[in-house]
Every structure is written in C-alpha cells, then in structure tokens.
Image (tube, rainbow, N blue to C red):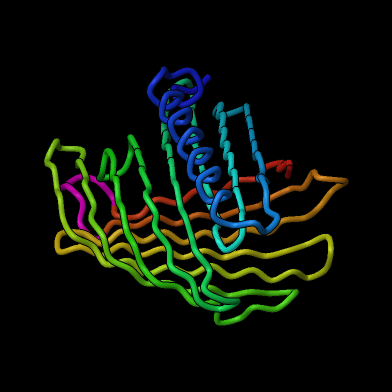
Amino acid sequence: MFNMVCAAGRPVAVIGVLAGVLGLVGVASADEEADDGGWSGSARLGYLSTSGNSETDNLNARLTAEYATGAWLHRGIVAGVGAREDGRTIAEAYELGLRTTYDFNDFDFVFGRANWRKDKFSGFDQQFSQSLGYGRRLINQPRQHLNVEIGAGARQARQRDGNRVNEAILRFGSDYEFRFNDVAAFNFDLSIESGEDNTFTEAVGAFTTKLMGRLATVVSYTVRNNSRVPEGTTRTDTFTSISLEYSF
C-alpha cells in the first residue's frame, strides 16, 4: 500500500546489517561479562483508514531489540511511517538506529549511537548522525526514571534540493518514564543535534496501556524540527499514531 512497505531492498538490507551488528556486539560483550542478560524488545504496528469526502490510509511500524549483558546495553530500532490521501502519498519516513551504553554505576554511563533518518517530505531527504558522550540518571526509582546525556559527533545530510551538508554536532538527549501503575505508563524522549548549519530536534510523547499479557496500546505524538531548510519546505513535521505493541 505504501512505498515504505513495498519498497525495496535497501531498508531490508540495512535491517539485516543492523541485526547482525547487534548480534556480534552482544556476543563480544557476553565474553567480558558474566552477569545474566539477554534479548528483549517490542514490535509496534498501527493502521488507520478513513473514507467519505476523502480517502486516507495511515500506517506506522516500529521494531525495537535490546541485548543486555553485565554493564552493557545494546539497542537497535527500525521504524517507518506512511500516509496516503485520495491515492496520493503525503508522508513517508524511515528511521534506523543503533545505540550502546556502558554503566559505571546506577547513575553514570557512557554511550555511543548512530542514527539514520529519511523523510521524503521534509526539508532534508536524509540525515545520518554519529555521537559519543556521557549520561546520568537524575531520577532512578521503581516508578519513574529520568536520564540526560550530552555528547559530540558528526552528521552527514542531504537536503531536498540536493545540497549536502557535513558538519560536527553537539548532542543533548533525555528520556523520562513515569509508570502510573502496572497497566499504564507515560514516556517522553527529547533529542537535539546542533551543528553550525542546522539544529535537528525531535520530541516524542507516548502513553502506553497494557491490554493483556504482552499486548498493549500506544498513543504517541512526535514533533521533528530542522532549524534551517530549503526554501519552500516547512521546518516542523508532526506525527500522531495509535498502535498495538507486542513486547518480547
């Protein structure tokens, strides 16, 4: 139905590489740490169709996999969103991410991450960023946590007009979770990557409600902003989704 679903082999190939890297990193870390860990993750899928004065179809999907061993945590993300209105594609975006953290203690950690984003309807056709840095858990309680992190790295980007921008970046990130009870939780993630030419900001808020067993509903709202975009494109894009999520 969407190009993001039927396209081709490049997203599939990248997913395969990402999974392979996660596996290799996890195995290597397991040799160094004897503590128990293992795989976990979640798969999320949402679809909405309307008809009448206009016909719209919206699809979003997200797969997250984690491998924990000792003080190491490795995490991979594959996500996509697409929308069509009256037979015309009006939104199509993909994201691939890989992140590794090492905990010094219950509060301090270091991280390394790489993130690739492609959005056919934003000012940037694609952006690929890499960063290293330090993080701290400001709140680390059973019902809630707040992590903040700061780092530096590089970003390679291609704008819609074909112009390429390669620059050094500073990165700030935070993630907050509050669990109301065993059934409901709220999450808010913030990511800012600032370079000389452009600052990319992403904020994601989500409510998760457990339905039964490992199945839950997720209502999320995402805001993405680029401070400098080519003429004729908007700086800010938003995504609203209602999805089912299965945890494993």
Q: Residue furthest bottom?
A: 138
**On screen, residue 102 above or below 36:** below
Q: Residue furthest left?
A: 163
Taking the spot 64% from the left edge, 56% from the top edge, the residue there is: 34
Q: Residue furthest right?
A: 212
Q: Reply yes or no: does residue 230 show up in magenta.
A: yes
**On screen, residue 176 above or below 7:** below
Taking the spot 42% from the left edge, 33% from the top edge, the residue there is: 92
Residue 160: x and y in percent read 21, 38
Dominant secondary structure of the magenta stretch?
A: loop
Taking the spot 34% from the left edge, 57% from the top edge, the residue there is: 225
Residue 194: x and y in percent read 26, 65
Q: Which residues are magenta?
A: 227-234
**On screen, residue 176 above or below 13:** below
**On screen, residue 195 above or below 210:** below
Q: Quadrant of residue 21?
A: top left
Q: Quadrant of residue 26?
A: top right
Q: Reply yes or no: does residue 112 show up in magenta.
A: no
Query: Quadrant of the image for the C terminus?
Result: top right
Residue 70: x and y in percent read 61, 60
Front residue of 43/40: it is 40
Taking the spot 16% from the left edge, 56% from the top edge, the residue there is: 167
Front residue of 26/99: it is 26
